[in-house]
Image (cartoon, grey):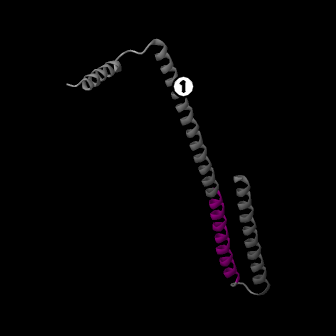
Amino acid sequence: MSDGRIVTLLLSALALGACNRAASPESAANDIAEARQSAAQEVADAKRDAEKAIDKADQAVQSKAGDLAATTAKASYDLAIAKADGEHKIAVQKCTTKEGTAQELCKQEADADFDAARAHAKAARAAQNLQDQ
C-alpha cells in the first residue's frame, strides 16, 4: 500500500469514529436551543397558515350563505307572485258568471286582492333582504 492510501484509510477511520462520539455539554445545549427555536418557528408558521386558511374558508362560507339567502328570498317572492297570479285568474273567471255591475265590482275586487298579494310579496322579500344584511 502506498503512504497516501494509508493516510486516507486512517483519516476515514477517524472520521467514522467521530460520528458516534457524544457532543460536549455546551455544544449539545446550543444544538438543543437551536432545535427548539426552529420547532417554535415552524409551529408559529403553521399556526399562521392555518389561521389564514380558516379565515379564507369562513369568508367563502359567509359569501355562500348570502347567496343562499338571496336565492331563497327571490324564490319565495316568485312563488308568492305565481300563487297570486293564479288566484287572480280564477277569481276573474268566476266574475264572468255575474252580470253588469256585479261583474265589474267582482273584477275590481279580484284586481285589488291581486295588487295586495303582490305588495305583500314585495314587502316580504324586502324584509328578508334587510334581515340577511
Question: With respect to residue 36, does 68 lie above or below?
Answer: below
Apparent side of residue 33 relative to residue 71 in the rendered image (left or right): left
Q: Which of 91 and 66 is in front in this view?
A: 66
Magenta stretch containing residue 92, yes or no?
yes
Q: Does the magenta stretch include residue 133?
A: no
Q: At label 1, which amino acid type do we have?
A: Gln
> Where residue 61 appears, x then y in whole percent?
59, 50
* Mark 1 Cα-neighbour bin, 10 Å: few <14, some 14–19, many ≥20: few
Q: Residue at x 78, y 80 (%)?
A: 105
Q: Is the magenta stretch mostly helix, strand or loop?
A: helix
Q: Which residue lies furthest to the front in this view?
A: 3
**The magenta stretch spans which residues?**
69-95
Give the residue at the far top of this rendering: 25
Residue under label 1, please give it: 37
Q: Work out which quarter of the rendered image holds the N terminus and state it.
A: top left
Apparent side of residue 105 relative to residue 48 in the rendered image (left or right): right
- Which quadrant holds residue 53? top right
